[in-house]
Image (cartoon, rainbow, N blue to C red):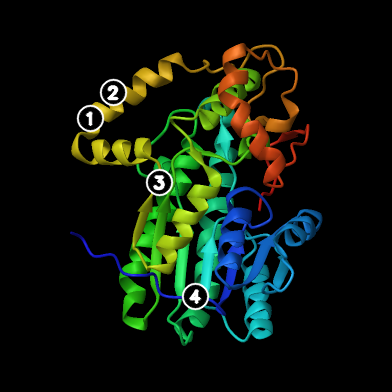
Amino acid sequence: MPQFTAAPPIAGLSALVTGGSRGLGLLMARQLGARGCRVTIMARDDGELAEAARSLRRPGGPPVGTAVCDVRDRAAVEAAVEDIAAREGGLDIVIGNAGVIQVGPSASMGHEAFHDAMASIFDGALNTSLAALPHLRRSPAGGRLALIGSVGGLLAVPHLLPYSCAKSAVAALAEGLHAEESAYGVSVTAVHPGLMRTGSHLHAQFGGDAAREFAWFSALAGAPVLSMNAERAAERIVSGVQRRRPRVVLTPAARVAAKAHGVAPVTTTRLSSALARVLPRDAVGEPGVTEGVAVRGGGTSAAPVSWLRKALGALNDRAAGRFNQRGRAALSGLRGRKHG
């Protein structure tokens, strides 16, 4: 019979989670706190941070710190990490989770969507990693770094190409840092989740035919078989970081897709092409649709909602209220917009 060893204790260690004010980041922070870590959550919105910190604090539990910071800003990240390390007496665990999701055909999203995704997702992960590594190397417990990628970074997903490109870069960064930092006693975990019921569809940006893009994405993200319970996902990720695993791929569908793409990339690319044909068509040029303009998920309330969308998305919609996800009906250009 296989022998299972207990995970090394992490109680008392100092942990930082970027993008920790809602969704998966909030849940990972909760897992770390439950295991006795002194947790600091970082995000751009001070109101969301305060609300998240209140939900994480427990009587008699370890303290919860906050740091207002845009992970795209290298200097701001470096200053924030220095402040946290000084306040906590060092850093032992860092999870880079901040990012943005943009859904729609590439022609409708435009160049800026790709640049914005790379800045928010990849630059955010890079800024966090390089600022944190000197402190993680000095950790008496041996530092742990985790970067949250996606199955979309292991194989390209139609209508999620800006996201897939940025997550692919995060995957390469995590694997490369794992190799380089092992000599310094720092473990680096690449995390590649599949669909999770976090309520993130309310903060995603939807381009092209935004109403239909929102309908398919929110339905699949909440489908019980294809998506994963977010609390379970956070538990699995933190356990992987605690055990210093180099790679964590979540959901059976994501594991199958990643393995299939590695073995038969031509076949999976053809399947992706078939999927793209049933997704909403590029709507640039139609009335009310402009390249580079996206609607936030909370702003699609006028979208036609079928009984199937209601049924499949019910779990995800409920998760939005539980994980500090507050949809905002905002219409905005992608150009110059920042995400944390």
Labelled pair 3, 1 in contact (Cβ < 8 Å): no
Label 3 is placed on what type of residue?
Answer: Leu
Q: Earlier in the sequence, mark 4 or mark 3?
A: 4
Residue drawn 26% across and 37% down?
A: 261
Residue 60 as seen in the image, left or right of residue 142: right
Distance between mark 2 and mark 1 Cα atoms: 6 Å
Q: Nearer the viewer, mark 3 or mark 1?
A: 3
Residue 259 sits in quarter: top left
Q: Which residue is mark 3?
A: 250
Q: Which residue is mark 2?
A: 270
Q: Which residue is mark 4?
A: 10
Q: Earlier in the sequence, mark 3 or mark 2?
A: 3
Residue 256 sits in quarter: top left
Labelled pair 1, 4 in contact (Cβ < 8 Å): no
Disc 1: CA contacts within 10 A as few (<14), some (14-19) or many (>=20): few
Q: Which residue is mark 1?
A: 266
Q: Position of residue 161 (x, y in %)?
A: 47, 35
Labelled pair 4, 2 in contact (Cβ < 8 Å): no
Distance between mark 4 and mark 3 Cα atoms: 22 Å
Compare residues 13 and 142 and report the one nearer the observer: 13
Distance between mark 3 and mark 2 Cα atoms: 23 Å
Labelled pair 2, 1 in contact (Cβ < 8 Å): yes
Label 1 is placed on what type of residue?
Answer: Val
Q: Nearer the viewer, mark 3 or mark 2?
A: 3
Distance between mark 3 and mark 1 Cα atoms: 23 Å
Labelled pair 3, 2 in contact (Cβ < 8 Å): no
